[in-house]
Image: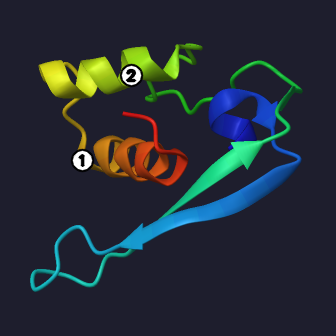
Amino acid sequence: MEEETGYRAKKMTPLITYYPSIGYNSEIIHCFVASGLKKISDLNLDEDEILSVVKMDFKKVLSMIKSGKIQDSKTICAILAYASKKKIY
């Protein structure tokens, strides 16, 4: 997390574990909620990585999923699992 975002989490809490391609391969994804975040450095990306960190209101992220702007399945699973857990609709 630190390398990709520049933030360090005081606590990482398991959120959801799932198989995105069950029957096709054995890939397993573990999603966590990071809390107690502290900015420790700038991004430390590989030469071919394109990434930016953007702080955003959670309800705006949900709206982006509903409108189809966010289409990445890993992101959608994690965000909707968190929304369900916190009863944010």
The answer to whether mark 1 and mark 2 are in CB contact below 8 A is: no
Locate the N terminus and report the quarter of the image it occupies. top right
| Residue at image location 49% in from the left, 23% down from the top | 58
Residues 80 and 84: in front is 84
Give the side of residue 78 with respect to residue 37, left or right.
left
State the count of labels.
2
| Residue at image location 15% in from the left, 19% down from the top | 67
Rate crowding at label 2 as few (under 14), some (14 to 19) or many (20 or more) other CA atoms within 10 Å: some
Mark 2: amino acid: Val
Mark 2 secondary-structure assignment: helix
In this orientation, does residue 10 appear?
yes
Q: Position of residue 48 (x, y in %)?
A: 43, 29
> Which residue bears the numbered disc 1?
73
> Which residue bears the numbered disc 2?
61
- Residue 79 to residue 38: above or below: below
Rate crowding at label 1 as few (under 14), some (14 to 19) or many (20 or more) other CA atoms within 10 Å: few
Q: Position of residue 25 (x, y in %)?
A: 19, 81
Look at discs 1 and 2 and give the one toward the viewer.
2
- Residue 87 to residue 25: above or below: above
| Residue at image location 46% in from the left, 29% down from the top | 49
Q: Position of residue 29 (x, y in %)?
A: 41, 67
Q: Position of residue 34 (x, y in %)?
A: 70, 46
Residues 17 and 88: in front is 88
For residue 23, the mark is none
Upstream in the sequence, badge 1 or badge 2?
Answer: 2
Q: CA distance from mark 1 to mark 2?
A: 14 Å
| Residue at image location 89% in from the left, 47% down from the top | 10
In this orientation, does residue 29 appear?
no
- Residue 66 to residue 57: above or below: below
Mark 1: amino acid: Ser
Mark 1 secondary-structure assignment: helix
